[in-house]
């Protein structure tokens, strides 16, 4: 049973991971992925053009979303799929459970779907007595450990192979102390094989839904989605309404960008296409979920977040994410895109996330669908302040700073006093735990005079007394 | 050429020599420089916290103060980016003065490279130097190519340093990763900020560099704070100080 981590502000949630020695290891693992991405991106001469095209296709689709949703559902129904609409997570979960009840199953196999994570489907079904088996290796690892994914593409990236060995020893009976990835993967394979054979319904996410054909595309590296829906008679595909693309020919733009951005592979090992149910005795259910997406779509500053194809490149490149780990965000989707999506759904719970960012802009430059992530994070801070969610102490210090900056003589005086204090006071009075800057850093050495003072002394021209 | 010099608030108070070096460099290159009195801050700390209501009056003050200049030069990529790219929503869309002031504001290296098209300098800096690319200089002002984007672009800071005799530019393993300063981020998220800074410093040390040079003193204030606390054998200098010919053994 997955335990949802309690909401804690990011700096505190990150502390142990950053300072406890796991940070550098996690950083190196993800920087390796980012470097692979750079090589793959560099191998496509038209990379930047593809990013622009992908962004334009997504913007166009989102601008005409209702029309494309209609077109998609008409075509998918024509192919024999059954369409379900869910306004929010609760409706989504209830729809899935109802299908399972109709089929009369208690065992399902699931391939990776961040949407079902977002909706909390696993705990909901488990509470209803359904056995849910995640079949993506990383997801299975976190599921066995009672954790949630810490990354949307690499769910177990925060776990070391020795720790996987301990978990598998406990649950799958592998040898004590075994940490060889090949051995552990083989063990997971035979364990999952049994689950696949017993599974009665396969649940998958969706990477792309094509309006023109009514078909679905699911991208995986392990082939678990294919096996998971090929054996059972019933396939439930859960998708956010932003997964649409207009035409068949648009798909190539995205498949070329997705795996390269995500893991630095030219393409995912499996790119599976589903056009209606497998045969006359099978069922394909498509659950289309809104859960705040149409709300996001109404806001001009944040609308482009709907472009997201969940590649995780912004996480891999984010210097904060790499050092603080995915769980420090306390959100289904961590990292830069999650820090836009989560507060737009639940501002109060996730108010610290837009500030867990140095505004370096690397996410914006790496994003394959050109979401201006760091500008959105900045805009989200404004939203939070507007909602009164910034701590009063910070609000006041900013108002004070603003007042100071509007009064140059006062600013000069405050500067002079500050520099004098820094010069004369003993080190422990200026460098202590009350001053977050000085816990690990020295303050600048205070100069005797400011530039303005130097200038007045050295360049006594009329121009410096203009104002 | 006639320009106004904008000196960021923390440079004015803590790093006056960076502003002096900038002024002397511009004057040496034949630029007539005004330093409008009464200038303070561009408003970035408030803006980056999301406090738009208290940012606006600071931004309006800046625009009034610099309204009569065709070029406003600032020795900081971050502050120049704030003014050029993030002022717009504090002004009405038909405020022509604000638009002009924002468009006229440039970072020092941009000015030297684009406006003055500097191709020679008579200075020597016989040291091993590693460049810290500030994120806002790189990804907002595009002073160089960022490693994420697959487009060739001139590296303005590097090209200027290449004009200096005897300088040896050392390669880094992560050429443009954030140092972790990020304004108020450095205190809000002190643990992550410090971890990021330490990683950057380790990369510079590994390159056998003697001095980190950057177009943004704010990144260097954070890195220098760590360097001095941990007594790392590294120095920091603003690019203007190197270009005007300051020696490495200056008081920092």
Image (cartoon, grey):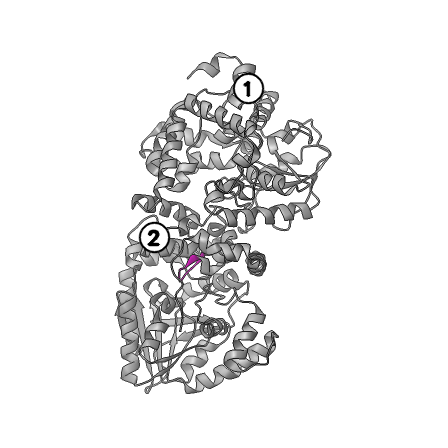
Check the picture and name the quadrant holding the N terminus of chain A.
bottom left
Per the image, the residue denoted by label 2 is A303
Give the camera-side residue of A169 and B206. A169
Of all chains, the one bearing label 1 is: A
Q: Secondary structure at mark 1?
A: helix
Q: Position of residue A302 (x, y in %)?
A: 35, 51
Residue B82 in view here: yes
Give the camera-side residue of B120 and A201. A201
Label whose residue precedes the other's in the sequence (1 or 2):
2
Per the image, the residue denoted by label 1 is A454
Q: CA distance from mark 1 to mark 2?
A: 49 Å
Relative side of B230 to A326, left or right: right
Check the picture and name the quadrant holding the C terminus of chain A.
top left
Q: Position of residue A422 (x, y in %)?
A: 54, 30
Relative side of A394 to B34, left or right: left
Residue A72 in view here: no
Give the camera-side residue of A59 and B158. B158
* Magenta residues (range): A329-335
Relative side of A104 to B45, left or right: left
Q: Position of residue B75 (x, y in %)?
A: 54, 31
Figure check: A386 above or below A265 = above
Picture residue at 52% right of the left edge, 65% below the top: A157
Q: Secondary structure at mark 2?
A: helix
Image quarter of residue B111: top right
Verify whether residue A183 appears in magenta: no
Of all chains, the one bearing label 2 is: A
Picture residue at 28% right of the left edge, 56% below the top: A295
């Amino acid at each position: 049973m997955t335990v949802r981590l309690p909401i804690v502000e990011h700096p505190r949630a990150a502390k142990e991971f950053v300072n406890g020695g796991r940070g550098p290891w996690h950083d190196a693992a993800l920087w390796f992925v980012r470097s692979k991405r750079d090589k793959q991106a560099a191998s496509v001469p038209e990379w930047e053009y593809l990013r622009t095209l992908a962004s334009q296709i997504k913007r166009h689709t989102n601008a005409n979303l209702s029309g494309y949703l209609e077109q998609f559902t008409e075509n998918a129904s024509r192919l024999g799929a059954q369409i379900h609409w869910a306004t929010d997570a609760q409706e989504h979960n209830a729809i899935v459970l109802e299908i399972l009840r109709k089929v009369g199953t208690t065992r399902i196999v699931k391939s990776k779907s961040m949407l079902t994570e977002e909706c909390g489907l696993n705990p909901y079904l488990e509470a209803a007595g359904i056995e849910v088996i995640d079949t993506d290796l990383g997801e299975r690892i976190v599921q066995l450990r009672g954790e949630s994914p810490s990354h949307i593409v690499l769910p177990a990236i925060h776990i070391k192979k020795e720790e996987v060995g301990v978990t598998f020893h406990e649950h799958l009976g592998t040898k004590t102390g075994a940490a060889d990835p090949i051995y552990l993967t083989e063990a997971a394979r035979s364990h999952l094989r049994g689950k696949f054979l017993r599974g009665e319904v396969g649940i998958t996410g969706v990477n792309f839904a094509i309006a023109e054909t009514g078909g679905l595309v699911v991208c995986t590296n392990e082939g678990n989605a294919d096996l998971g829906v090929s054996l059972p008679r019933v396939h439930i595909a859960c998708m956010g309404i932003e997964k649409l693309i207009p035409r068949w020919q648009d798909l190539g733009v995205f498949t070329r960008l997705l795996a390269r951005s995500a893991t630095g592979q030219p393409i995912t090992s499996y790119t599976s296409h589903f056009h209606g149910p497998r045969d006359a005795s099978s069922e394909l259910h498509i659950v289309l979920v809104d859960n705040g997406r149409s709300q996001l779509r109404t806001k001009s500053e944040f609308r482009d977040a709907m472009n997201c194809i969940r590649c995780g490149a912004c996480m891999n490149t984010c210097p904060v994410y790499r050092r603080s780990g995915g769980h420090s965000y306390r959100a289904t989707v961590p990292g830069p895109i999650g820090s836009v999506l989560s507060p737009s759904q639940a501002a109060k719970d996730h108010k610290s996330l837009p500030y867990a960012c140095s505004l370096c802009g690397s996410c914006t430059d790496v994003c394959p669908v050109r979401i201006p992530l760091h500008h959105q994070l900045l805009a989200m801070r404004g939203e939070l302040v507007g909602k009164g969610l910034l701590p009063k102490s910070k609000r006041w210090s900013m108002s004070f700073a603003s007042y100071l900056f509007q009064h140059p003589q006062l600013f000069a005086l405050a500067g002079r006093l500050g520099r004098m204090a820094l010069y004369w006071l003993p080190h422990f009075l200026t460098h202590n735990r009350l001053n977050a800057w000085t816990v690990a850093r020295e303050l600048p050495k205070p100069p005797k005079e400011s530039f303005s003072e130097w200038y007045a002394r050295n360049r006594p021209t009329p121009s410096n007394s203009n104002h | 050429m006639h320009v106004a010099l904008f000196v960021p608030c923390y440079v004015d108070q803590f790093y006056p020599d960076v502003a002096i070096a900038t002024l002397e460099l511009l004057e040496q290159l034949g630029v007539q420089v005004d330093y409008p009195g009464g200038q303070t801050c561009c408003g970035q700390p408030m803006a980056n916290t999301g406090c738009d209501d208290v940012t606006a009056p600071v931004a309006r003050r800046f625009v009034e103060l610099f309204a009569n200049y065709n070029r406003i030069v600032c020795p900081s990529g971050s502050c120049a980016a704030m003014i050029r790219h993030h002022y717009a929503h504090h002004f009405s869309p038909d405020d022509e003065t604000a638009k002009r002031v924002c468009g006229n504001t440039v970072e020092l290296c941009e000015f030297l490279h684009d406006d003055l098209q500097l191709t020679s300098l008579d200075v020597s800096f016989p040291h091993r130097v590693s460049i810290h690319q500030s994120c806002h200089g790189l990804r907002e002002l595009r002073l160089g190519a960022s490693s994420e984007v697959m487009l060739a672009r001139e590296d303005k800071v590097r090209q200027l340093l290449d004009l200096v005799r005897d300088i040896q530019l050392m390669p880094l393993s992560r050429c443009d990763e954030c140092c972790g300063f990020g304004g108020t981020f450095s205190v809000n998220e002190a643990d992550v900020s410090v971890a990021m800074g330490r990683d950057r410093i380790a990369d510079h040390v590994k390159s056998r560099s003697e001095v980190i040079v950057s177009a943004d003193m704010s990144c260097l204030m954070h890195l220098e704070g760590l360097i001095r606390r941990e007594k790392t054998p590294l120095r920091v200098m603003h690019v203007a100080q190197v270009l005007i010919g300051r020696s490495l053994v200056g008081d920092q």
